[in-house]
């Protein structure tokens, strides 16, 4: 599904964000990417989403070298990758429903289907009763669920989440993780970047660890008793 071959990302001579990263994320897999602040977690996700390009190396998504995609065709890649950001990135002057519908609008979804599909995914995250609210009228947990709904509305086979619980308390964090598990159970490949070791331990999923831009561990932690 996603393959990274000898990926390097260097912003300047003094700053190497990623160094010789080789990874493969399979279809339907749930993977945590962890490591201390500055380890390269966010950069890794940005490269998969092609918000940035690697300095060296090759990234394949569904078998296609994403560096070769022309700018005017990037929407096709991004229609297949949902992204959830730590800071939500919701449009403050649009309602919850309009925020989600906007994600459909930018990929050319027919206008008659936009609100219908937006409402359906909002119902999935349990916030249909908030559809006419504005982002600043919602709690942090509700805003994050709207952001997840927006990322899912195009039914992408891949979901990337960058520190999605970074601004949430432990209870809400677990709620968001349960939602990701449900999404993954329906076949979506989920990659979550987080420094929260407690969440990682509780989930029992494959964990990729970065330190100073290097891959130092790729293991599967199980919470099941032996």
Image (tube, rainbow, N blue to C red):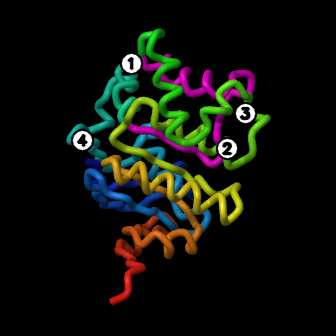
Q: Dot 2: within a 10 Å radius of its alpha carbon, few (fewer than 14), some, or many (20 or more) residues?
A: some
User: In the visual, does 50 lie left or right of 58?
Assistant: right
In primary-sequence order, the first of circles 1 and 4 is 4
In the image, the segment drawn in magenta is: 81-108
Question: Which residue lies under the disc numbered 2?
Answer: 142
2 and 4 marks in contact (CB < 8 Å): no
Of the numbered discs in the image, which one, if any, rests on residue 72?
Answer: 1
Q: Work out how far the residue at label 1 is from the one at label 3, CA to CA, in angstroms.
A: 30 Å
Q: Dot 1: within a 10 Å radius of its alpha carbon, few (fewer than 14), some, or many (20 or more) residues?
A: few
In primary-sequence order, the first of circles 2 and 1 is 1
Q: Work out how far the residue at label 2 is from the one at label 1, CA to CA, in angstroms.
A: 33 Å
Discs 4/3, front: 3
Q: Work out how far the residue at label 2 is from the one at label 3, CA to CA, in angstroms.
A: 9 Å
Helix, strand or loop at mark 2:
helix
Report x, y in % for residue 5. 27, 54
Viewer-closest of 207 and 155:
155
4 and 3 marks in contact (CB < 8 Å): no
Q: Is residue 99 magenta?
A: yes
Question: From the image, which quarter does the C terminus lie in?
Answer: bottom left
Instruction: Please report the residue visible at 47 percent of the width from the left and 68 percent of the height from the top.
Output: 210
Discs 1/4, front: 4
């Amino acid at each position: 599904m996603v393959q990274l071959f000898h990926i390097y990302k260097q912003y300047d001579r003094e700053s190497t964000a990623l160094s010789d990263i080789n990874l493969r994320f399979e279809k339907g897999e749930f993977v945590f990417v962890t490591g201390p602040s500055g380890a390269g977690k966010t950069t890794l996700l940005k490269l998969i989403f092609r918000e940035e390009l690697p300095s060296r190396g090759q990234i394949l998504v569904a078998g296609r070298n994403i560096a070769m995609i022309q700018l005017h065709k990037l929407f096709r890649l991004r229609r297949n990758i949902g992204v959830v950001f730590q800071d939500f990135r919701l449009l403050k002057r649009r309602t919850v429903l309009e925020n989600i519908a906007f994600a459909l609008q930018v990929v050319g979804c027919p206008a008659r289907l936009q609100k219908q599909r937006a409402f359906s995914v909002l119902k999935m995250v349990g916030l249909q009763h908030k559809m006419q609210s504005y982002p600043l009228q919602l709690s942090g947990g509700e805003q994050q669920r709207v952001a997840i709904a927006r990322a899912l509305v195009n039914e992408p086979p891949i979901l990337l989440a960058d520190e999605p619980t970074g601004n949430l308390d432990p209870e809400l964090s677990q709620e968001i993780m349960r939602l990701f598990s449900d999404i993954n159970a329906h076949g979506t490949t989920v990659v979550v970047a987080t420094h929260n070791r407690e969440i990682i331990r509780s989930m029992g999923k494959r964990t990729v660890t970065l330190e100073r831009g290097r891959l130092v561990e790729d293991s599967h932690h199980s919470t099941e008793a032996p």
